[in-house]
Image (cartoon, grey):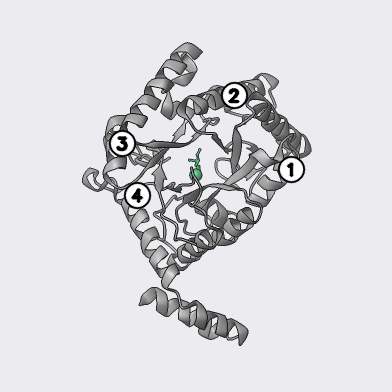
C-alpha cells in the first residue's frame, strides 16, 4: 500500500493573540486575510471553521446575509485552493448557552442550540464540507445536582437526531473533552461519544474527532483512542497537540511534552491509514505560548507539522522486525530501549 501523503489543517483560532483568564492579549490580533496567507505559506491545505469564524457576529445577521457571506468565503477559498475541513457551531459564547446548549435546563435555550447547529449545517453545505464538528463545551455541569444526567443523554441524542434529520448527508463528529469549561462533561471520551452515536437515528453518520490533549485530560492514551475510533471506522478528524498532565487544556505544540506519546500517535495514524481518504486532514489544535512575539507567531503550527513529519519518518524506519522478535520473546525491557534509542538516534 502506498505511503500516506499527509495534508495539514488548522483553524483561525489557532493563531491566537495570547489572552488567558489572567491577562489580556500579548499580540495585536491579525485579520482573516493574514491568517489565510500564513496557512498557504506554511504548507497547510485546509482550514477548520466555527460558524462565526466563517461569518463573524453571526447571531446579529439574517440568514440571507449569512448565506451571502458564506458563499463569498467559499469563492475566496476555492480561488486560493484551500479546502474547508469542517464547520463547528460555537455553542459556548452566546448568553443563550450559559447553562449549556443541548442540555441547558431552559427549553428556549436548547432550541437556540439546535437551531444554531442546523444553521451551521447549512453553512457547511455552502462551504462544501459534510463534516459538522461538535465540541460539547458546556454539555455538563459545575455541580452534578444541577442537571439530570440521564435526561442529558436523551437531550444530546435528541439534538443529534434533529441535525441528522435536517440534512441527509451531514456527518456529525463529536469532539469529547472530559472537563473545562465544565467540572464534568457528559460525553468525556471517545467511548462515550461512539456509544451515544448508537442511540441516534443514523449511527453511521455519527463519529468523532480525537484531540490528543482531551484524551490526556481523561487519563487516556491518545494513540489508543485513535486505534479505538478507527476500529469502528469513526475517526473523522484529528486534532493533534500536547498536554502536560491533568490541568487546564494547554493545546501545546505536538510532541512538546511527550515525544514518545507523539510517536505512538503517529504510529497509530499510520497503521490505521488515517489521512488516505478524501477530506482527512491532520489538524493541529495548538496555541502559541503567551510569551510568543509577533514575528514567531506561526512557530507552534509549523513546529507541530515538522515534528509530525519527522515522526512519520521515525515510524516508517522503526525496526519492526527486531520489535516483533522482542515481543515474541516477551522482552519488553529491550523493546523499551529500542524505542528510546530510535527516538534519540
Ligand atoms: C476546545 C477545542 C475546540 C474544538 C473546536 O478545547 O478543542 O477548539 O476543536 O470547536
Ligand atoms: Mn480541538
Q: Nearer the viewer, residue 320 or 225?
A: 320
Q: Position of residue 5 (x, y in %)?
A: 41, 55
Chain-order first, disc 2 or disc 3: 3
**Secondary structure found at label 2:** helix
In this figure, which residue is indicated by the disc labeled 2?
118
In this figure, which residue is indicated by the disc labeled 1?
198
Chain-order first, disc 3 or disc 1: 3
- The CA distance from mark 2 to mark 4 is 31 Å
Contact, CB < 8 Å: mark 2 with mark 3?
Answer: no
Q: Nearer the viewer, residue 130 or 92?
A: 130
In this figure, which residue is indicated by the disc labeled 3?
35
Contact, CB < 8 Å: mark 1 with mark 4?
Answer: no
Q: Quadrant of residue 331?
A: bottom right
The quadrant in which the C terminus is found is: bottom left
- Residue at 44% x, 46% y: name it: 285
Residue 38: mark: none
- Residue at 41% x, 77% y: name it: 342
Label 2 vs label 4, nearer the camera? 2
Left or right of residue 328: residue 302: left
The answer to whether residue 112 shows anywhere in this view is yes
- The CA distance from mark 3 to mark 1 is 38 Å
**Secondary structure found at label 4:** helix
In this figure, which residue is indicated by the disc labeled 4?
301
- The CA distance from mark 1 to mark 2 is 21 Å
- The CA distance from mark 1 to mark 4 is 35 Å
Q: Quadrant of residue 138?
A: top right
Amino acid at each position: 500500500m502506498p505511503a500516506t501523503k499527509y495534508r495539514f489543517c488548522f483553524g483561525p483560532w489557532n493563531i491566537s493573540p495570547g489572552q488567558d483568564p489572567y491577562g489580556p492579549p500579548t499580540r495585536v490580533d491579525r485579520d482573516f486575510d493574514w491568517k489565510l496567507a500564513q496557512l498557504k505559506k506554511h504548507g497547510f491545505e485546509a482550514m477548520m471553521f466555527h460558524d462565526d469564524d466563517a461569518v463573524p457576529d453571526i447571531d446579529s445577521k439574517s440568514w440571507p446575509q449569512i448565506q451571502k457571506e458564506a458563499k463569498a468565503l467559499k469563492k475566496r477559498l476555492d480561488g486560493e485552493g484551500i479546502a474547508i475541513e469542517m464547520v463547528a457551531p460555537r455553542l459556548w459564547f452566546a448568553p443563550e448557552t450559559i447553562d449549556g446548549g443541548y442540555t441547558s435546563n431552559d427549553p428556549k435555550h436548547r432550541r437556540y442550540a439546535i437551531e444554531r447547529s442546523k444553521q451551521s449545517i447549512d453553512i457547511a453545505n455552502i462551504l462544501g464540507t459534510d463534516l459538522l464538528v461538535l465540541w460539547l463545551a458546556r454539555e455538563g455541569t459545575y455541580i452534578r445536582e444541577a442537571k439530570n444526567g440521564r435526561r442529558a443523554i436523551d437531550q444530546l441524542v435528541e439534538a443529534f437526531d434533529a441535525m441528522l434529520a435536517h440534512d441527509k448527508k451531514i456527518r456529525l463528529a463529536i469532539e469529547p473533552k472530559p472537563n473545562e469549561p465544565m467540572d464534568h462533561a457528559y460525553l468525556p471520551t471517545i467511548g462515550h461519544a461512539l456509544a451515544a452515536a448508537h442511540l441516534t437515528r443514523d449511527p453511521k453518520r455519527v463519529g468523532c474527532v480525537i484531540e490528543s490533549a482531551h484524551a490526556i485530560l481523561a487519563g487516556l492514551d491518545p494513540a489508543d483512542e485513535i486505534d479505538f475510533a478507527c476500529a469502528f471506522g469513526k475517526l473523522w478528524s484529528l486534532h493533534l497537540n500536547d498536554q502536560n498532565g491533568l490541568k487546564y487544556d494547554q493545546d501545546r505544540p505536538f510532541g512538546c511534552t511527550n515525544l514518545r506519546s507523539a510517536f505512538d500517535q503517529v504510529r497509530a495514524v499510520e497503521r490505521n491509514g488515517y489521512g488516505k481518504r478524501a477530506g482527512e486532514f491532520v489538524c493541529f489544535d495548538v496555541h502559541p505560548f503567551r510569551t510568543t512575539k509577533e514575528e514567531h507567531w506561526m512557530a507552534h503550527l509549523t513546529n507541530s507539522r515538522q515534528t509530525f513529519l519527522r515522526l512519520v519518518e521515525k515510524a516508517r524506519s522503526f525496526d519492526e522486525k527486531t520489535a516483533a522478535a522482542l515481543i515474541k520473546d516477551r522482552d519488553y525491557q529491550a523493546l523499551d530501549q529500542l524505542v528510546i534509542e530510535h527516538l534519540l538516534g
